[in-house]
Image: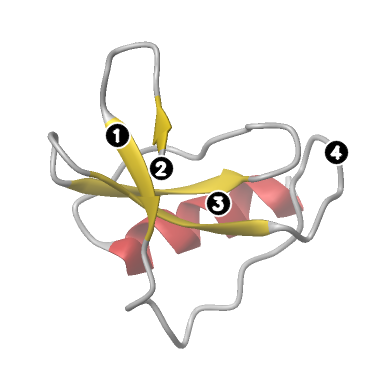
Amino acid sequence: MRATATGDQLRPFSGASGSELKPCPFCGSRDVGYFEHVYARHFSVMCKSCGAEGPPRSEHEEAARLWNARAQG
């Protein structure tokens, strides 16, 4: 588990499937995954190499869509 600056705990979200994540738009790493913000109860996609994080959303599918849109842009 990893703590953020606000104190939220992040943990890998293993229940996400069906949404292939694109590499990190900042460092190019493919080591990206879904994370659940435990206290705020929302999901985001985060790069495990550089720490880049996509926008938080209530559904992991929407978090993946926004991450992938950023990775294309």
Pick the quarter of the image with the N terminus. Answer: top left
Amino acid type, mark 1: Gln
Query: Considering only vertical position in the picture, is 2 above or below 44?
Result: above
Amino acid type, mark 3: Trp
Separation of disc 1 and disc 4 at Cα?
Answer: 23 Å
Query: 10 Å neighbourhood of mark 4: few (<14), some, or many (≥20)?
Result: few
Q: Dot 1: what SS?
A: strand
Query: Considering only vertical position in the picture, is 36 above or below 50?
Result: below
Q: Which residue is drawn at 55% across and 51% down?
A: 67
Mark 4, residue position = 27
Q: First in sequence, mark 4 or 2: give its number.
A: 2
Q: Residue at x 64, y 56 (%)?
A: 32
Amino acid type, mark 2: Met
Query: Considering only vertical position in the picture, is 3 above or below 47?
Result: above
Separation of disc 3 and disc 1 at Cα?
Answer: 20 Å
Query: Considering only vertical position in the picture, is 7 above or below 50?
Result: above
Query: 10 Å neighbourhood of mark 1: few (<14), some, or many (≥20)?
Result: some
Mark 2, residue position = 1
Q: Which-is-in-front pick, marks 4 and 3?
A: 4
- Looking at the rendering, which quadrant does residue 13 occupy? bottom left
Amino acid type, mark 4: Cys
Separation of disc 2 and disc 1 at Cα?
Answer: 7 Å
Mark 3, residue position = 67
Say whether marks 2 and 1 touch (CB < 8 Å).
yes
